[in-house]
Amino acid sequence: MKLLVANLFRLAALALLLVLLFRTEWLSFLFTPLTSNNAPAVYTQNSLASLALGHLQLVVGSIACSAVLAVVGGIFVTRESGADFLPLSRAIANAGQTFPPVAVLALAVPATGFGAMPTLIALFLYGLLPIFENTVAGLKQVSPQVLDAADGMGMNGTQRLLQVELPLALPLILEGLKVATVINIGTATIGSTVAAKGLGEVIIAGLISDNTAFILQGGLIVGLMAVLIYDAMGLLEGAITQRIGLRPA
């Protein structure tokens, strides 16, 4: 029963997202009461589907870069040779999360110009902390007995890392990726302030014109994308962990 309800929710959310992206006019009767002075109820200045695609490109690009650096950094500081760098690495990752993305944009624009690049830099920094911390936690929670068994089987350090430690840490690493992705889906809306293509354009247009309908459209699309992508990543995580034997079939 729970599975049926969950699947119905997924289908309803996906259907609503598709309607908002490709047939927003079907919902104009819901948005019209939110407008005033005969303002348009549906955002038509740009394709919502195209803006959503640009939004996702920003998120995927930034998360991919964050994941590479955070996972490599997490591996490094959990090795004996890099343990002394853990406090510094953690401080850098925390700084990326606590430094306001708007401030990063303001600093990056003079160096990189307007467009996607300053937004990618801001999102890259914002995504480091959850992935880094989960990588460190995942690697540190591997049982010493398991590591001793791997050594007893004659594995060298690289083999032990790739065949034992990373697979056992994978669920926590994937959880960090999920959290970082959802955070960046919401945060990417600020990219439109520096001319990056994304759904923030719809929200900003609504704020400028005092059109609540536009704000709601942009917010709904971003929210639905975050929920559905988080759910899809959760299903993928379950399939991966089951395949490598960390979860019963």
Image (cartoon, helix red, strand yellow):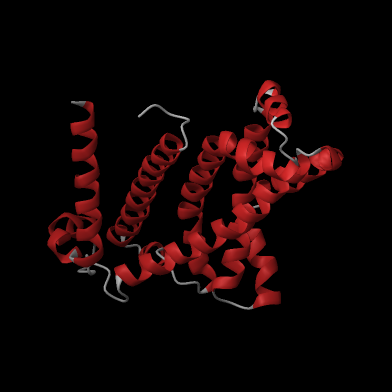
Residue at x-position 32% and y-position 56%: 221
The image position of residue 59, as x and y in percent, is 49, 59
Q: Residue at x 22, y 69 (%)?
A: 40
Of residues 167 and 138, the one drawn nearer to the viewer in this rendering: 167
In the image, taking residue 36 as reference, residue 190 lies left or right, namely right
> Looking at the rendering, which quadrant does residue 81 occupy?
top right
> Which of the image's four quarters has the N terminus?
top left
Q: x, y (%) of residue 4?
A: 18, 33
Is residue 14 visible to the viewer in this orientation of the structure? yes
Expressed as whole percent of the image width and height from the top left, the position of residue 22 reads 21, 66
Q: Choose top left, top right, bottom left or bottom right for residue 147.
A: top right
Relative to 129, 47 lies left or right? left
- As drawn, the residue found furthest toward the top would be 145
The answer to whether residue 205 is seen in the rendering is no
Q: Is residue 161 above or below residue 33?
A: above
- In the image, taking residue 218 as reference, residue 29 lies left or right, namely left
The percent coordinates of residue 145 (x first, y second) are 68, 21
> Looking at the rendering, in which quadrant would you find the C terminus?
top left
Q: Quadrant of residue 36?
A: bottom left
Q: Is residue 63 above or below residue 11?
A: below
Nearer to us in this view, 145 or 239: 145
Residue shown at the point (20%, 46%) measured from the top left: 11
Q: Is 210 in front, or is 157?
A: 157
